[in-house]
Image (cartoon, grey):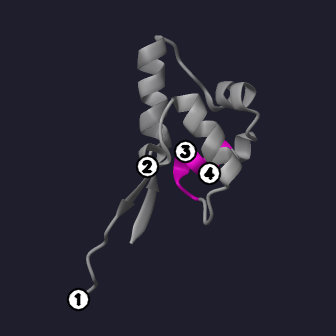
Amino acid sequence: MTIESQFRKLLKQKELDENRDISLKDVERETNIPWRSLLNWRDGTFKQYPADALETLCIYFDCQPGDLLVYTETEPAE
């Protein structure tokens, strides 16, 4: 089982929708989520996903939690 962050995909879509480049610093300024946390979201390196940040990012991206985090089943090792 793997839970993957779709942060990069949603950020790219927001850039296209708003016709502007959006840096992590921009997201930090607009959401008040620390840059280091945003880096973890972008890179998918969180061990736990903070509920408050999840809610804030869902509002920012106008999405549902299932759009931001996707569960994928992994193949069993042989």
Q: What type of secondary structure mainly makes up the magenta span?
A: helix
Query: Label 4, label 3: how many angstroms apart (C-alpha)?
Result: 5 Å
- The residue wearing badge 4 is 40
Element on which disc 3 rests: helix
Query: Label 3, label 2: how many angstroms apart (C-alpha)?
Result: 16 Å
Q: Three-letter amino acid code at disc 1?
A: Glu
Query: Label 3, label 1: how many angstroms apart (C-alpha)?
Result: 31 Å
Q: Specify whether 75 is left or right of 40.
A: left
Residue 72 image position (x, y, % from top left)? 34, 63
Q: Three-letter amino acid code at disc 2?
A: Gly
Q: Three-letter amino acid code at disc 4?
A: Asn
**What label does residue 66 carry, if any?**
2
The residue positioned 38% from the left and 72% from the top of the image is: 1
Q: Nearer the viewer, residue 59 or 17?
A: 59
Residue 69 falls inside the magenta stretch: no
- The residue wearing badge 3 is 42
Query: Label 2, label 1: how many angstroms apart (C-alpha)?
Result: 30 Å
Residue 42 falls inside the magenta stretch: yes
- N-terminal of the pair, mark 2 or mark 1, is 2
Quadrant occupied by the C terminus = bottom left
